[in-house]
Amino acid sequence: MLKADCHTLVQRCGVSFDTRHPLYLRHETDLATMLPMLAPMVGLALVVFSLWDVVIDIPHAGWTLLVRSGAACVLQLLARLPARCISMQWRMVVLYWLLMATVEACGALLTDGFMLAMPGIVLCVLCAALLTLRIDQFLLLLSLPSLAFLGFALVLLQGRDLYSSLMFYALAVLLAIGVLMVKGAFRLEAFHNEERLLHQSRHDAMTGANNRAYTSELAAREFALAQRYRKPLSVAMIDIDFFKQVNDRYGHDAGDSVIRSLAATCGHCLRVMDHFGRWGGEEFLVILPETDAAAAHDCAERLRNAVESMRVATPAGPLSCTISIGVATLQPGQEDWQALVKQADVGLYLAKSRGRNRTEVAAGAIAPQQSAA
């Protein structure tokens, strides 16, 4: 329990070391999108600061202009390197090191310029907190620039100036860490809220299965993939037999328990690649990618037998139920997934009319020998 609490606290503070976390991957993607726009802006800012150099120290302004212009060109090249050449993490590290090296070196080249460059150095330290969500990457960003700052400060400054610069830098680092942790906590909370809302919009509140809208979206996607790559696709329509009698005899609470148990039972029997959704009331739809008619029939029978063996506790004693299933498989010439679902509905009607508690494959698919319970 203590370990879990510590892990939660660490995550809430933005100190997550898992590079596979969706939030981290999204942050990397955002940086990759913004980098081509940010690099020219930062390079232009470096060159524009040459005007400041002229005001501070005209004799050395030419050298700083050369350094700033070279850094701006290298920034452009690094930003435009293909992703296969250097990862986004190391690309940002190198770009930040180059930026800090330019600011510190130009401050050192100017007469009394290093103390005057402190606001720019502090600003760069704070910007490091915006480039990452992880404390280890933040420390990596500051590693070499901090050593370079310490070296420049010891060589160029003395007495009160040295003490003040080191204090300003240390305070900037502490403030940046605070910004990193607060930003990480807010982004993580926003991410969890977004994921929660997305889950609620896609799933049925009572059963946790996909709702009808999301099931339709998944069906349309699997239908398009099956047609494009010429893969088999099947769907199964499930309906609880005599469900009204369950509600009338045991009450609606028992009926809700049956629906929840059915959803849980079917979920355990399906593959990860399959999709299970509540279609409405006591009807459910199963989408079976890369599954032909025979395999779909076997899967439906597995579901039917599992539900038949299911027992639901009620005040009146254990309750059992059965289901009828209609199966349909994608056929050449079908234009949309709705036609496939309608075909499965026809199979369900056949199962109902032929005695219930059975699986029927709709006409058009090669059905195996049907078994009735």
Image (cartoon, grey):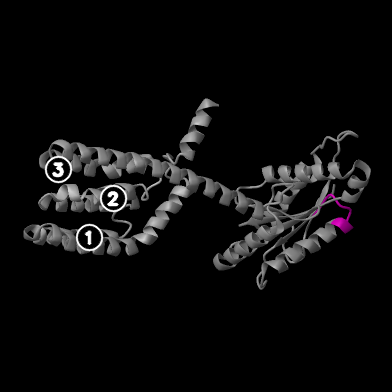
Picture mark count: 3
Q: Nearer the viewer, residue 337 or 51?
A: 51
Q: Which mark is on residue 152? A: 3
According to the picture, the residue beneath numbered tag 1 turns out to be 46
Whether residue 81 is visible: no
Q: Residue at x 81, y 37 (%)?
A: 311
Quadrant that contains the N terminus: top right
The answer to whether the residues at label 2 and label 3 have Cβ atoms under 8 Å apart is no
Q: Nearer the viewer, residue 118 or 47?
A: 118
Give yes or no for residue 354 being in the magenta stretch: yes
Gap in Å between the C-alphas at discs 2 and 3?
16 Å
Gap in Å between the C-alphas at discs 2 and 1?
12 Å
- Identify the magenta region: 352-359
Q: Nearer the viewer, residue 235 or 208?
A: 208
Q: Is 302 left or right of 159, judged from the image as shown?
A: right
Q: Secondary structure at mark 1?
A: helix
Gap in Å between the C-alphas at discs 3 and 1?
20 Å
Q: Amino acid at mark 2?
A: Cys
Quadrant in the picture for residue 55: bottom left
x, y (%) of residue 234? Answer: 68, 59
Judge the density around disc 2: few (<14), some (14-19), many (≥20) Cα neighbours within 10 Å.
some
